[in-house]
């Protein structure tokens, strides 16, 4: 069984910063790509940032230059550093990861989500 557990969400003022973390646990053979998505009320879930096992990254245009995704492979953890936050960044943030268990094909797992609220 695999679990992805996010942390680091909360309430922050516009212009502030937050750092999200997502740790994968379980009988993991390998983790491939990892990513962060978000879903605001009344909107579809959207990709925020993505990082491959080799460290290549891509970002949604709306967060380029403000957010940074990184990962620590030894800790099976992905991070999202969010700077210069705006009210429109308010959403539930979800991490996901393509994970292979021993003897199985890889599949995508999702975390439970963490709320980020940007408001004065």
Image (cartoon, helix red, strand yellow):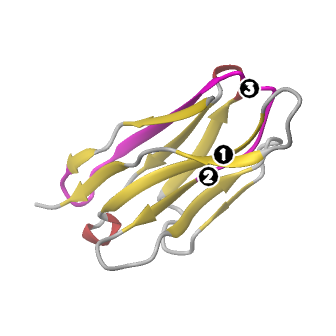
Above or below, 50 relative to 74: below
Whether residue 13 is in magenta: the answer is yes
Q: Residue at x 22, y 60 (%)?
A: 14
Q: Residue at x 47, y 70 (%)?
A: 45
Q: Residue furthest left?
A: 120
* Residue under numbered circle 1: 97
Asked if the residues shown at circle 3 and circle 2 are in contact, with their CB atoms under 8 angstroms apart, the answer is no
Q: Residue at x 35, y 37 (%)?
A: 8
Quarter containing the C terminus: bottom left
Relative to 94, 32 lies left or right: right
Q: Nearer the viewer, residue 107 or 57?
A: 107
Asked if the residues shown at circle 3 and circle 1 are in contact, with their CB atoms under 8 angstroms apart, the answer is no
Whichever of labels 3 and 1 marks the residue nearer the N terminus, that label is 3
Q: Secondary structure at mark 2?
A: strand
Marks 3/1: CA–CA distance:
11 Å
Asked if the residues shown at circle 2 and circle 1 are in contact, with their CB atoms under 8 angstroms apart, the answer is yes
Above or below, 46 relative to 66: below
Q: Secondary structure at mark 1?
A: strand
Above or below, 6 relative to 102: below
The circle drawn on residue 35 is 2
Q: How many marks?
A: 3
Tell me the chief SS of the magenta region. strand
Residue 35 showing in the rendered view = yes
Q: Secondary structure at mark 3?
A: loop
Relative to 56, 2 lies left or right: left
Marks 3/2: CA–CA distance:
17 Å
The circle drawn on residue 28 is 3
Q: Nearer the viewer, residue 15 or 115?
A: 115
Nearest to the eye among marks 2 and 1: give it.
Answer: 1
């Amino acid at each position: 069984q695999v679990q992805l557990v996010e942390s680091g969400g909360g309430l922050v003022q516009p212009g502030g910063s937050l750092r999200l973390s997502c740790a994968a646990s379980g009988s993991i053979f390998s983790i491939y790509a990892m990513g962060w998505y978000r879903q605001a009320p009344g909107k579809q879930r959207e990709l925020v940032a993505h990082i491959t096992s080799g460290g290549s990254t891509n970002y949604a245009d709306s967060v380029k230059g403000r957010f940074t995704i990184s990962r620590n492979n030894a800790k099976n953890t992905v991070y999202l550093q969010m700077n210069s936050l705006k009210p429109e960044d308010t959403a539930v943030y979800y991490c996901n990861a393509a994970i292979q268990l021993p003897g199985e094909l890889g599949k995508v797992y999702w975390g439970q989500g963490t709320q980020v609220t940007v408001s004065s």
